[in-house]
Amino acid sequence: MGATVLTVDDDIQLQEMLHLFLSAEGFRVVQAFDGEQCLALIQSKQPDLVLLDIQLPDMNGITLCRSIRSIYPLPILFLTGNKEQANKLDSLQAGGDDYITKPFDQLELSARVRSHMRWGKILASTEQTMSRKLTFSGLELDLERKTVIANGAPITLLAKELHLLITLAKNPHRVYHPRQLYELIWDDSSRYSSDLIKVYIHQLRKKLEIDPANPRYIQTVRGFGYKFDGTEGKLP
């Protein structure tokens, strides 16, 4: 049996459809219909990925996501019928890795699940071989809690920003081509865009750097790509 997906939704018909489709794709599926069941199953079944509805009978999905993040480091993908951009951003800032709007295409869902599971394996490998925290001068990344403190203050990163930062910071001084970063984090070479990587690097610098125009941590290597420089600090 393949990797385990925990689906969290109070819609019985949707749960049946998810179970049939994901099982056919080779996944083991466990189901929760409210927040309490979800938290219990995360502890007992240790799923590889959570599919989480944003509206649940006993708890808001965004609130539940924050509770999940205190005990669960692997990917959380939101299923939502809500098309308001603010709620989508809230889901990411609460610790979600991605969202997909209902009704969704089954092939797209499968691609997203596989992509985020791949990232989850990379992150789990990182946690096994390195400290749970990456500490540099003026910057601390907590890999378990998915939190970042820069220049003495906690900062909020969207899921892809955090993935990008961890990828760079776990291998200081390694130069990554934008395509490498895209394939590691988005896992979809057919939609590669160097401009997208440039935008995310710009956003990270604005949040991390005292002077984003003269970055200290994420540096551009002209003609090659980007690297993380933490030489003023150290890995614990």
Image (tube, rainbow, N blue to C red):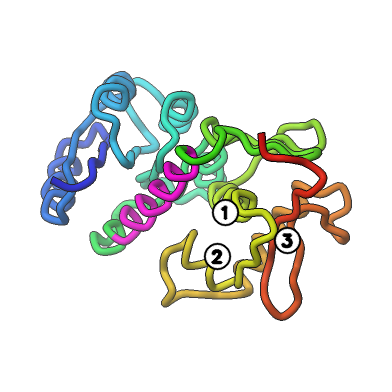
**Residue shown at the point (35%, 45%) measured from the top left:** 79
Q: Distance between the Cα atoms at labels 2 and 1?
A: 8 Å
Tell whether position 112 is magenta: yes
Looking at this rendering, what residue extends furthest in the bottom direction?
223
The crowd level at tag 2 (other Cα within 10 Å; few <14, some 14-19, many 20+) is many
Residue 166: image location, x then y, percent = 59, 48
Assign the C terminus to one quadrant of the image: top right
Q: Quick check: 19 left or right of 234?
A: left
Q: Quadrant of residue 36?
A: top left
**Residue shown at the point (48%, 62%) measured from the top left:** 184
Residue type of the residue flagged with mark 3: His
Residue type of the residue flagged with mark 2: Leu
The crowd level at tag 1 (other Cα within 10 Å; few <14, some 14-19, many 20+) is many
**Residue shown at the point (54%, 73%) measured from the top left:** 179
**Residue shown at the point (73%, 40%) measured from the top left:** 234
Q: Which residue is mark 3?
A: 202
Q: Distance between the Cα atoms at labels 2 and 3?
A: 14 Å
Question: Main SS of the magenta segment?
Answer: helix
Q: Quick check: 14 left or right of 124?
A: left
Residue mark closest to the camera, 2 vs 3: 2
Tell whether position 24 is magenta: no
Q: Which residue is mark 2?
A: 181
Assign the N terminus to one quadrant of the image: top left
Residue 210: image location, x then y, percent = 86, 47
Q: Mark 2: which secondary structure?
A: helix
Q: Say whether disc 2 or disc 3 marks the residue closer to the N-terminus.
A: 2
Q: Which residues are magenta?
A: 111-127
Residue 185: image location, x then y, percent = 49, 59
